Image (cartoon, grey):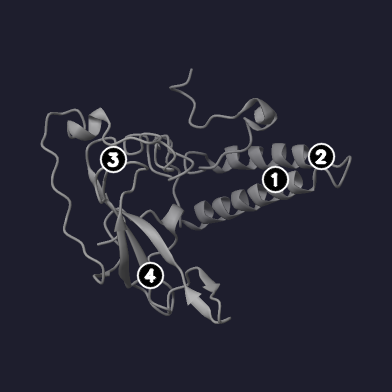
Amino acid sequence: CRITLHEFHCDRHQRWKDAYFTFLERFTVEELEKQKRELQSLHDSYYLPAKKHKNVRKTLRKQMEKIDARVDDIKVGNAVVEQNAKRRCRTCFESNDICDGRCWGFWKHSQSPHHVQGGGNGSTLEPIMEAKVGDRVTVGPNWNEIRLGGRGSQQDPVRFGTVVNIKSWASGGDELDCVAVKWDKSVDCGRRRNTSGTEEQQSEIYRWGAVARNGQRMYDVR
């Protein structure tokens, strides 16, 4: 049965398993509207005690808004139903032929077997492209808009940034397959205030040759 499940729900959220999904691309308008009705019913069941379930109701409302946006996109032709969409990871949003479940960096490993074997097909793993601190980069071929946001803004259609650090993507990994990038100020990225009280652009980390489950090297930026 696990093969047919696109998303898993823990024991605590078994009531949600037929209505709450992270990825909506495989559902038709009718299925989405049914999900919304069930979410509304769940939402209305979490009123007492009101304070205790405040965040739960907020989560369900956000999901209903997400469904409304998806339905509107389908109806106006901005999106299509992908009934054969691959199962995807809820952390990195990549499909299961790309993500091996270790994308969130907790796992300490050097190279798992499919990495060494080039995806299990006997092919030789290609070397990582050279990178150095100070390099100018932009959005790469494996940029995931769902996880990372748009490729630019209305004012600046293309992102540009500077590499400020190079390190390992996996915790305990033995390859420098991750870059930290500080985007140009025109890009809407995270900022924080430094000790002097002025805003400072934060760097963000991206894959730079990290090996996917299928043996492909992934480049979020280039």
Q: Nearer the viewer, residue 69 or 157?
A: 157
Residue 1: percent from left, percent from top:
48, 17
What residue is at 89 percent from the left and 41 percent from the top? 49
Q: Amino acid at mark 3?
A: Ala
Q: Amino acid at mark 1?
A: Leu
**Which residue matches tag 2?**
46
Is 29 left, or right, of 221 in this rendering?
right
Q: How many numbered marks, from 0 up?
A: 4
Is 147 left, or right, of 60 in this rendering?
left
Q: Amino acid at mark 2?
A: Tyr
**Which residue matches tag 1?**
60
Numbered badge on residue 182: 4
Is 81 left, or right, of 43 in this rendering?
left
Q: Nearer the viewer, mark 1 or mark 3?
A: 3
Q: Earlier in the sequence, mark 3 or mark 4?
A: 4
Asked whether disc 2 touches disc 1, contact meaning CB atoms under 8 Å apart, the reply is yes
